[in-house]
Amino acid sequence: MSTFTLQQTPDTELWQLVRKGNLQAFGEIYERYWETLYESAYWRLYDKAAAKDIVQEVFIYCWQKREQIQITESVEAYLRVAVRFKILNHLKSEQAREKYCLLAGRELPEITHSTEESIAGTDLQASYRRELQRLPEKMRQLFIDSRDHGLSIREIAEKHALSEQTVKNQLSAALKKLREGLGNFLLD
């Protein structure tokens, strides 16, 4: 397929080509959306390097997982949700949060969602909750203590009378199981 033909191809058809390993189709999707995704990330982070890194990581992830990711409605909405979750994960780290607060000097801007993004976000949350419930009870509790309650490895180990290495191993295993279970969605 020529570049001209790819430029006229709808996103969902391009994505089907990407799933088959077509690098030119992936390049076309990249060219269509990298700038708007970067701007979206930048205006939420006020950090050019972090915004570039996040967008790059999303595209790398999409290429690496192209065979598992099924997009039937909107490639753009999927990419926007993936970038949003990457941004949230970035901000979740305490150092990044402190840096953001110092740079921005205010709360996160209010984010408006398109209908497609809201649906994709709702689907992701439902899938996440379902996969979280599939984890073994102890592993699920350790993961919740880490992600939802913000406890450190040491605090979790003390709370559950486990070694720090055991907690690390359990959290790593939980992330792996969640990634496998979510398949279509980005989780880090």
Image: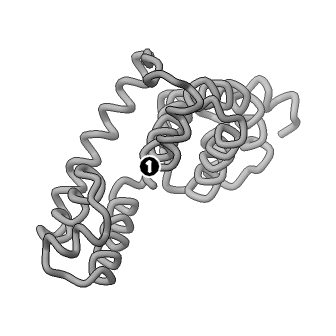
Is there any visible trace of residue 11 in the rendered image?
no
Q: Given the image, on which type of amino acid does mark 1 rest?
A: Glu
In the image, 18 versus 125, the foreground residue is: 125
Q: How many marks?
A: 1
Foreground: 172 or 118?
172
Q: Residue at x 27, y 59 (%)?
A: 151
Determine whether the residue tagged by mark 1 lies in a helix, strand or loop: helix
Res 54 visible: yes
Residue occupying image coordinates x 59% and y 53%: 61
Residue at 51 percent of width and 39 percent of height:
87
Question: Left of 1 or right of it: where is 12?
Answer: left
Q: Position of residue 133 (x, y in %)?
A: 16, 57
Q: Picture quarter containing residue 31?
A: top right
* Residue identifier under label 1: 94
Does 40 appear above or below 134? above
Name the quadrant containing residue 137.
bottom left
Q: Is residue 136 above or below residue 181?
A: below
Does residue 144 appear to the left or right of 169 in the view shown?
Answer: left
Decide which of 66, 33 is in the foreground and name it: 33
Horizontal and vertical percent position of residue 103: 59, 30
Q: Position of residue 60 (x, y in %)?
A: 65, 53
- Within 10 Å of the Cα at label 1, are there few (<14), some (14-19), or many (20+) other Cα atoms? few
User: Looking at the image, which residue is at 43% across and 17% down?
Assistant: 110
Q: How is the image coloured?
A: one colour
Q: Position of residue 98 (x, y in %)?
A: 49, 41
- Residue 32 to residue 151: above or below: above
Q: Which quadrant of the figure contains the C terminus? A: bottom left
Q: Is residue 141 left or right of residue 48?
A: left
Left or right placement of residue 46 versus residue 108 in this view: right
> Does residue 111 lie above or below 41 as drawn?
above
Q: Which image quadrant: the N terminus?
A: top right
